[in-house]
């Protein structure tokens, strides 16, 4: 007993460490996604929560949804304010706390599925499942969205763990019912858990010859769910004059997702009915069934498309389809490795674990019905039914890849068991798996490759980016011919590549062929207008040619909306020589600055620095000094000390107050025109230090307006 307690303490220490690891990953993703805007559903949920707090009334969304998530958001706002990033942080913590819940679920599932195995098997299953949860980029990314999935997954993991614990007492059955009810009021998709839980516990009790206990437990599950959902159903009945159990989402989506007229056309018809939710529920159900039965072939073809999408590699597809959106190399690696890689691992391992046999079939002298009950008492039937239900309903409606997240607790738990089964000390203690268990993961893999030939795409993209890297090295070495050859190879691999055309344009610029460069840039813009690189290079070329109005339009178009530091990107690639005067924030300064924030509305004619910023100007022959016009910009009017360096020389300190002031630094003798690089280092602050409600999450240094060489 003492040894087992010691093992349990160590197990909990490892789970705590994995939870901390999960929180670190989620905080990293939380930081990466700080500037992501709210989506449509997110904005609606947030507005609903704010209305609840400000006006003390519950306002139904245009498409009716359960009430618990907006209530959760309202409670979070009371604690951490309404800043979106703060609310995302709350969800990141909840997502990290899902790790111990998954560990407990996997441990209980292993104990229930293979009771003959030593305790170390269940412990390892829990730890491996927790590790996969902690390192799961998809879960971390979904925590940054103000949607129901993060809260739902934590609750689902808790409910499944409670249900799988052995010999449940009456209070645990009631707790499971309450949990199922709460899940239903987060997402109505949880409603089938009620009959599944009741039926599975009843079957287990009947298999053990304790039917009274089974009936009592099933009744307690029903009672617990009714205690939570019942008041909301009564409210709906009194409000709308008829029974709406939870919401009308299922009925309305049945019509929205299957009518050939399209979602927007159907939405217009639904919205025209106003707030008569009962009529909308009835009409949507009738119309949805009617359009399906009117053309079953189209419905089956639609389900086939949704099936392929359901098994897609989410992040790979997103990166391929939204090529204009910059993602940092670290986040790309996390998306592909910890996102799609972990999904593929848990899909294959989890489906294999769900299909395989975990304990030997015992020959018992018992009747047919008792044997049948024992078979259905296996947790695979409960969890497999849940998996099948989630997959089927998603195909009937439509696939958003977050809709497959309710599968994660099951897949993660079984993946942990499959991993633990491969430990050398345990491998031979389990029954030999039947080859048929491989059919389910092989089917999942086949559908994934049916959706897209991912290995071929990976090979193509790897070759293209190796060619682009070779072109970049050639450009750095000043060899435009080699750069153009490598870029042409990249273009041959991917005819739609904007980056290859940008590399060809840069090679033409290095070779002095401005017309060819402009042709490549125009072709890239026509191919993908939202990609910033060709616009920046085109603006730089127009600036060099003296067309300042057109140059400003190109240079200003993307800086405010891109997640990439476009000023730093153009710093290394601009061909226009700087002038002796640099006006910050005039729309023509990109390429001559880095380490500065793009101007927000109201910040015209100057820029905020970060903690360290650089600018470059040209010192004409005979120039003697470099001057900067700047101010501290602190909301409280305080002064700050800055250090200014010219061409890597000794930093010079200056005290900068709240008003614009000009500082001058001497230059070494300038015999002929040369480029001068000036650097400004300063302390920084967050606007929220002065105004906690500020939406500005930038870290600000000082404000700079002019840099002039005299």
Image: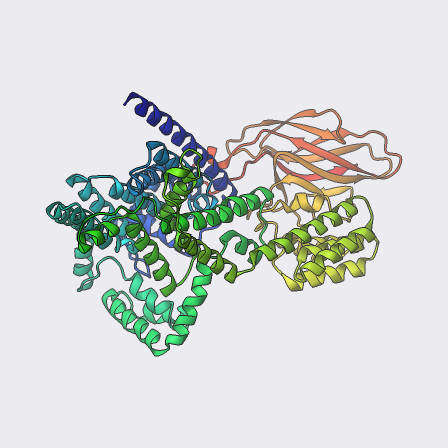
Which residue is the extreme one toward the right?
Answer: 671
Q: Is residue 693 above or below residue 407?
A: above
Tell me, yes or no, if residue 228 can be seen here: no
Residue at 18%, 43% in the rendered image: 174
- Would residue 404 be found to the left or right of residue 494 on screen? left
Left or right: residue 690 compared with residue 570: left
Quadrant of the frame with the C terminus: top right
Question: Residue 429: which quarter of the image?
Answer: top left
Q: Residue 84's image quarter?
A: top left
Residue 427 at least partly seen: yes
Name the foreground residue: 538 vs 205. Answer: 205
Between 162 and 66, the one lying in front of the other is 162
- Residue at 47 percent across and 36 percent down: it is 688
Quadrant the N terminus occupies: top left
The spot of residue 521 in percent (x, y) is: 72, 59
- Looking at this view, is 112 or 255 the one in front? 112
Q: Is 257 situated left or right of 598 in this image? A: left
Q: x, y (%) of residue 350?
A: 41, 48
Residue 386, how many percent across, how many down? 31, 53
Placement of 408 over or under 171, stated as above or below: below
Q: Is residue 130 above or below residue 6?
A: below
Q: Residue furthest top?
A: 2
Total tally of numbered discs in the picture: 0
* Position of residue 362 measured from the top left corner of the image (x, y, whole percent): 27, 46
């Amino acid at each position: 007993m003492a040894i087992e307690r010691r093992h349990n303490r160590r197990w909990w220490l490892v789970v705590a460490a994995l939870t901390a690891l999960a929180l670190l990953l989620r905080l990293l993703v939380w930081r990466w996604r700080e500037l992501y805007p709210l989506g449509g559903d997110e904005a609606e949920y947030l507005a609903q929560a704010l209305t609840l707090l400000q006006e003390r009334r519950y306002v139904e969304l245009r498409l009716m949804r359960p009430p618990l998530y907006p209530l959760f958001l309202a409670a979070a706002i009371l604690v951490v304010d309404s800043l979106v990033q703060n609310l995302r942080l709350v969800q990141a913590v909840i997502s990290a706390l899902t790790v111990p819940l998954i560990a407990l679920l996997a441990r209980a599932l292993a104990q229930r599925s293979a009771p003959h195995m030593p305790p170390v098997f269940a412990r390892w299953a829990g730890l491996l499942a927790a590790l996969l949860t902690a390192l799961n980029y998809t879960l971390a990314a979904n925590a940054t969205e103000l949607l129901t999935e993060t809260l739902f997954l934590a609750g689902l993991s808790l409910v499944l763990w409670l249900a799988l614990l052995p010999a449940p007492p009456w209070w645990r059955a009631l707790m499971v019912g309450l949990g199922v009810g709460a899940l239903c009021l987060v997402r109505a998709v949880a409603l089938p858990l009620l009959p599944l839980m009741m039926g599975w516990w009843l079957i287990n009790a009947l298999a053990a010859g304790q039917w009274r206990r089974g009936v009592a437990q099933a009744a307690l599950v029903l009672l617990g769910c009714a205690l939570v959902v019942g008041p909301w159903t009564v409210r709906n009945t009194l409000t709308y004059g008829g029974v709406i159990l939870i919401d009308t989402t299922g009925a309305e989506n049945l019509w929205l997702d299957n009518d050939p007229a399209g979602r927007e056309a159907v939405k217009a018809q639904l919205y025209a009915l106003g707030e008569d939710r009962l009529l909308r529920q009835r009409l949507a159900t009738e119309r949805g069934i009617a359009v399906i039965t009117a053309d079953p072939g189209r419905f089956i073809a639609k389900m086939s498309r949704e099936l392929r999408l359901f098994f897609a590699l989410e992040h790979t597809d997103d990166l391929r389809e939204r090529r204009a959106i910059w993602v940092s190399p670290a986040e790309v690696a996390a998306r592909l490795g910890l996102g799609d890689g972990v999904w593929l691992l848990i899909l294959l391992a989890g489906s294999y674990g769900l299909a395989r046999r975990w304990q030997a079939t015992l020959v018992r002298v018992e009747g047919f019905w008792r044997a049948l009950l024992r078979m259905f008492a296996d947790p695979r039937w409960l969890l497999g039914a849940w998996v099948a239900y989630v997959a089927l309903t998603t195909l009937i409606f439509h696939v958003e890849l977050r809709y497959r997240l309710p599968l994660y607790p099951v897949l993660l738990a079984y993946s942990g068991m499959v991993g633990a089964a491969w430990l050398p000390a345990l491998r031979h203690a389990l029954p030999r798996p039947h080859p048929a268990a491989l059919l389910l993961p092989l089917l999942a893999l086949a559908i994934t490759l049916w959706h897209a030939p991912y290995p071929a795409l990976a090979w193509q993209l790897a070759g293209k980016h190796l060619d682009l890297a070779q072109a970049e090295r050639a450009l750095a070495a000043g060899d435009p011919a080699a750069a153009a050859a490598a870029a042409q190879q990249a273009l041959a691999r991917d005819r739609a590549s904007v980056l290859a055309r940008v590399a060809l344009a840069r090679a033409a610029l290095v070779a002095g062929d401005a017309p060819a460069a402009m042709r490549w840039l125009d072709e890239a813009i026509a191919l993908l207008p939202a990609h910033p690189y060709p616009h920046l290079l085109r603006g730089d070329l127009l600036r060099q040619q003296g067309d300042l109005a057109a140059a400003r339009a190109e240079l200003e178009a993307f800086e405010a909306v891109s997640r990439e530091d476009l000023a730093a990107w153009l710093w290394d690639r601009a061909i226009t020589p700087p002038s002796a005067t640099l006006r910050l924030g005039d729309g023509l300064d990109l390429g001559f600055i880095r380490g500065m924030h793009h101007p927000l509305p109201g910040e015209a004619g100057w820029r905020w620095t970060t903690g360290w910023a650089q600018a470059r100007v040209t010192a004409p022959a005979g120039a003697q000094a470099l001057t900067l016009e700047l101010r501290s910009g602190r909301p409280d009017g305080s002064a700050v000390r800055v250090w200014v360096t010219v061409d890597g020389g000794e930093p010079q300190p200056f005290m900068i107050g709240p008003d614009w002031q000009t500082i001058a630094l001497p230059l070494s003798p300038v015999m002929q025109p040369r480029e001068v690089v000036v650097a400004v280092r300063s302390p920084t602050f967050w606007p929220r230090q002065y105004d906690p409600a500020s939406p500005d999450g930038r870290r600000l240094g000082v404000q700079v307006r002019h840099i002039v060489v005299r």
